[in-house]
Image: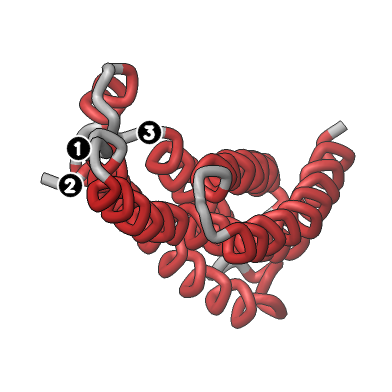
Amino acid sequence: MTFSDKSCKEFTVELASKASVPGGGGASALCGALGCALGNMVGSLTVGKKKYADVEDEIKAAMEKAESVWRELLDLIQKDADVFEPLSKAYGLPKDTEEQKAYKTEYMEKCLRDACSVPVAIMEKCCESIDLCKIFADKGSTLAISDAGVGVAFSKAALLGASLNVFINTKAMTDKEYAASLNTKANNMIAKYTVLADEIFAGVNERLN
């Protein structure tokens, strides 16, 4: 059974335990999936309503994309665990001889790259979720606008959470140029999408107050 197939209670219990997985990456992926699904919910409450007939096609397209995004984020929960386990074992490799040291360094670098790939993917999907939440907040049913606000808040939290899983791994890399490129990519997503998420949330909040 994958982590995304577990019940909310089972997942939370394992998250709270001393087990190395699931961790912050998997939790971020779940948070992002919930955020995107909430945006999709706004769409579901919008389509079929005469009041929103002029935006129905756009909302349907956004819903189709949102379902793809939240399903991918659910898959990334398990993928994050899958790439972290080899890395956790790599830290315990012996380094008593020069040969062992060289092997450990090379293997660790590969594991670190793999371990970064998933949180980067989570961040990318969260950016897509934030873009979608904007559509749902701007054009979706006003009766569900609060859900669009919650969705974008979750998506932002997931984006930031996943970024820390990138940074902790790039910090340990020996290839500093590659590490810097990943850091730049992550920081660019943070710079653009936290601002957009805050704008969307503020807009929702203003309309509710």
Q: In what element is the residue under mark 2? A: loop
* Percent coordinates x, y for residue 138 in the rendering: 77, 61
Q: Give 162 or 34, whichever is nearer the viewer.
A: 162
Mark 1 and mark 2 in contact (Cβ < 8 Å)? yes
- For image coordinates 79% across by 51% down, the residue present is 200
Q: Mark 3 or mark 1: which is in front?
A: 3
Return the residue at label 1: 6
- The answer to whether 198 is drawn above or below residue 18 in the figure is below
Decide which of tag 2 and tag 3 comes sooner along the chain: 2
Return the residue at label 3: 23
Please give the label number shown on residue 127.
none
Q: Is residue 119 visible?
A: yes
Q: Give 204 or 183, whichever is nearer the viewer.
A: 183
- Left or right, 17 with respect to 24, comes to left
Q: In what element is the residue under mark 1? A: loop
Q: In what element is the residue under mark 3? A: loop
Say what amino acid the circle numbered 2 marks: Thr
